[in-house]
Image (cartoon, grey):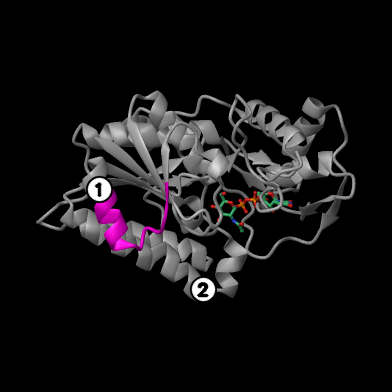
Amino acid sequence: MTVLVTGGAGYIGAHTVRALRSSGRKVVVLDTLERGNREAVIDAELIVGDVADQGLVAKICGDKGVSSVIHFAAYKAVGESMLEPEKYWNNNVASTEKMLDVLTEQRVDKFVFSSSAAVYGTPLSMPVTESDPTKPESVYAETKLAVEKLLGAFSQNTDCRLRSVSLRYFNAAGASKDNRIGEDWSSSQNLVPQVMRALLDKDFKLEIFGNDYPTPDGTGVRDYIHVEDLAVAHVKALDYLESGGETLVCNIGTGSGTSVMQVIDLAEKISRKKVPYRIAARRAGDPISVFADARLAEKKLGWKAARGLPEIIESAYEWHRTHPNGYRRGN
Ligand code: UD1
């Protein structure tokens, strides 16, 4: 009874591997290491390879006794997805389908998928619920929604009915409490790593993408979820499938919104430093405000965020302060 974690050397994947190990499960990680880090895989076997390699996936399933899969392996840069769409369709969707074919043959019937709140596009009302319309605004988001739909189709397969949970993450941030895993500001353009860079890299100034939004302080509002809470959500999703749960699509957020300026204020308080910033133009495609209705996850998975923005900022600050070069040498 082993859990195969694809992309387990990535930011969210690596945190999830540890949460699975803490829950007593056996774990094997499959990751190309194209964008993941070997050092992030703690206390689990790492196999370097691609989910599209059907022979390899079949062998792992057979050799390791895989009974469920948590699938993170994918590209996730929104901007890049618009410039190189084919690369995204190939890696995120075609490769996933190849793997799903093998899993069906191997009778692996439980699957947790790393989806995104990006599938909603610019939501019409707030908070966003799972039954709200999906309207992806990037190729990245299209590929996430396509896999959700693919999973719906595989759940109809009469040979091996795959049951899945697609977790639509809101804004993952923070680092592990013991400071062993975190993000790299050079490869993530998301707000929290960029705020940390502004605090710690004297040559860098944060750009705030617009302060004239119709929000209380004029800056964009998002739902920041601690990466360790996110990791626990995957364990809960697996518990749910193991106890017979049916295919489900579920938001994973805290349910409350935080503005860019609030993130900066807290980062200044925690670090006791000023965040150098300048107000820049709005970023194309940025919605004004997005936060989750997180009630379904609580009802179906028994999951609720346990950590708030202070834990996110404290852990991120500690990680970036001690790992200014991410996992690379020279820290
Ligand atoms: C991004 C992804 C989304 C993904 C989500 C969760 C984009 C366009 N969207 O969402 O697909 O599901 O992360 O990880 O990349 N901001 C600044 N300055 C910065 C960076 C961000 O002002 O340097 C602002 C943004 O305008 C936004 C907020 O901070 O209001 C959060 O931005 P970001 O962390 O990039 O996440 P999202 O765009 O919400």
Q: Cβ–Cβ below 8 Å for labels 2 and 1?
A: no
Where does label 1 land, which residue? 61
In the picture, residue 69 is in which quadrant? top left
The image quarter in which residue 312 lies: top right
**Residue occupying the point 54% across, 50% down:** 36
Q: Is residue 314 left or right of residue 17?
A: right
Which residue type carries mark 1?
Answer: Cys
Q: Nearer the viewer, residue 146 or 5?
A: 5
**In this rendering, is residue 273 above or below 329?**
above
Give how far across and how far down residue 296 sits, in percent.
36, 37
The three-letter code of the residue at mark 2 reads Pro
- Marks 2 and 1, how far apart in space? 30 Å
Residue 297, percent across and down?
Answer: 38, 35
166 horizontally vs 282: left or right: left
Q: Secondary structure at mark 2?
A: helix
Q: Residues within 10 Å of mark 1 (few under 14, many from 20)?
A: many
In the image, what residue occupies the spot 79% across and 61% down? 281
Q: Position of residue 91 (x, y in %)?
A: 44, 65
197 sits to left or right of 176: right
Q: Quadrant of the C terminus?
A: top right
Residue 106: image x %, image y %? 18, 52
Residue 248 in view, yes or no: no
Classed neighbour count for the residue bearing mark 2: other residues with Cα under 10 Å, few (<14), some (14–19), many (≥20): some
Q: Report if residue 331 is visible in the image.
A: yes
Residue beneath disc 2: 85
Between 267 and 214, the one lying in front of the other is 267
**Residue 46 tag number:** none
Magenta residues span: 47-60
